[in-house]
Image (tube, rainbow, N blue to C red):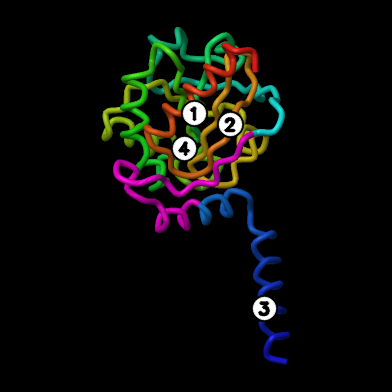
Amino acid sequence: MEMIRELRGLCMLKAGLVLLPFGLAIALMACAGESSAVDSSTEEPVTADSVVPSLEMAFDFPFAVYTGKKTLGSIFLNLSDLQGTPVVLNFWAGLCPPCTAEMPELQEFYDEYADKVLLLGIDVGRYTGLGERTDASELLDDLGITYPTGFDRDGNTIKMYEVFNMPTTFFINSKGEIYRKWTGVINKKALIEISDEMIADESSGV
């Protein structure tokens, strides 16, 4: 009987989570990830790294730029405007502690790989309950971020890309196809390895 009561309690908990507003659920998962994140400068990050079995086209979406206007060439763009260049697409938010933790290594990656891959950070804080645009701008200023960043202008991106945890990073080849998805904090080592693999596979026609 005790086991039955425990199972019933678990089912009720799961049901409650399903009924949570989408943004609140994202926020809870992001906060839960804070305690499991590791120092990415010394260890491998906690992640749910997964290879996409068949390459699918990345969903197009409009965004406005925070930083990197000179690199991107405009303040208002669509992701499809970047096709022809490999892209590392990172979803983050201003009040997301794991996002803050990985940004310095994203900056280091950008400083070393800007001529090979375009790093683009998209703020989805206002759609996930993890901050407004002012929070995002303040974080970028505090960390001295110079790699291209912006915010999702239509609010559909997290649904299209199924961003259920923050941060989440996508590797997109020059044809606009999703090559790899990485859920959770990512470090420079992983960014370089996956980017090199994506570029090599594309060059060899894989």
- Specify start and end residues of the magenta stretch as a single range: 30-51
Q: Which mark is residue 23?
A: none
SS category of the residue bearing label 4: strand
The quarter of the rendered structure image containing the C terminus is top right
At label 4, the amino acid type is Trp
Q: How crowded is mark 3: few (under 14 residues within 10 Å), some or many (20 or more)?
A: few
SS category of the residue bearing label 2: strand
Name the residue: 43% across, 34% down.
190
Instruction: Name the residue tied to disc 4.
Output: 92
Instruction: Name the residue tied to disc 2.
Output: 180
Q: Do the residues labelled 1 and 2 touch (CB within 8 Å)?
A: yes
Q: For the view shown, which residue lies furthest in the front direction?
A: 204
Find residue 90 and report its horizontal and vertical position in percent: 49, 31
**First of labels 1, 4 by sequence position:** 4
Q: Are marks 4 and 3 in contact (CB under 8 Å)?
A: no
**Distance between the Cα atoms at labels 2 and 4?**
17 Å
The quarter of the rendered structure image containing the N terminus is bottom right
**Distance between the Cα atoms at labels 1 and 4?**
19 Å
Camera-side residue of 2 and 32? 2
Find residue 108 and report its horizontal and vertical position in percent: 31, 27
SS category of the residue bearing label 1: helix
Find residue 85 and report its horizontal and vertical position in percent: 53, 11
Instruction: Name the residue tied to disc 1.
Output: 194
At label 2, the amino acid type is Arg
Camera-side residue of 142 and 187? 187
**First of labels 1, 3 by sequence position:** 3
Instruction: Name the residue tied to disc 3.
Output: 9
